[in-house]
Amino acid sequence: MFLIELALKENGIVHRLTRFTSGEEAVQILCNPDDMDPLVPDAILLDLNTPRSDGFQVLATLKQAPRFAGVPIAIITSSRATSDKHRARLNGTRLIEKPSQLAAFLSTVGEAVKEMLEKG
């Protein structure tokens, strides 16, 4: 997540980043029906390989929550699998492929988040 934060800073994106240790924790906190002051982020970045859950499982749960209907969600991954790209498209979600070079990573992720925030 340090690199995500660096990408946001390098691209001039003012942010408050909330991190979760797993997809399971993200779903528990974000989708808690008893929360009187729910967290509704401006954008959500999901790692495809989240601990204790699959990024697509987390995505499906978030997509079912009405409070996130207008929140742009993207999956960020190092996977180059066509099946992952296809699943992301079927779910109406952007897939951001993580470049291996630092400068490319910062630019790619920063530009993707800027686009998400402009559309959201």
Image (tube, rainbow, N blue to C red):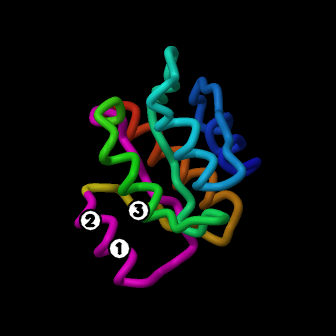
Q: Position of residue 6 (x, y in %)?
A: 71, 43
Q: Is mark 2 on a helix, strand or loop?
A: helix
Q: Where is residue 28 in the image (x, y as percent from the top left)?
A: 56, 43
> Magenta region: which residues?
69-91
Residue 26 versus residue 32 in the image, above or below? below
Tell me if label 2 and label 1 are in contact, CB under 8 Å: yes
Question: Within the image, what quadrant is residue 77 found in?
Answer: bottom right
Answer few, some or many: residues within 10 Å of disc 3's Cα (few below 14, many 20 plus, some between 14 and 19).
many
Q: Which badge, 3 or 1, comes first in the chain's sequence?
A: 1
- The amino acid marked with disc number 3 is Leu
* Residue 5 or residue 63, whichever sits in front: 63
- The amino acid marked with disc number 1 is Lys
Q: Where is residue 43 in the image (x, y as percent from the top left)?
A: 45, 36
Residue 39 versus residue 48 in the image, above or below? above
Disc 3 versus disc 2: distance between alpha carbons? Answer: 8 Å
Answer few, some or many: residues within 10 Å of disc 1's Cα (few below 14, many 20 plus, some between 14 and 19).
some
Badge 3 is on which residue?
95
The numbered disc on residue 85 is 1
Q: Is mark 1 on a helix, strand or loop?
A: helix
- Report the residue at 39% width, 51% height from top: 61
**Quadrant of the frame with the C terminus:** top left
* Residue 27 or residue 41, whichever sits in front: 27
Badge 2 is on which residue?
89
Tell me if label 3 and label 1 are in contact, CB under 8 Å: yes
Tell me if label 3 and label 2 are in contact, CB under 8 Å: yes
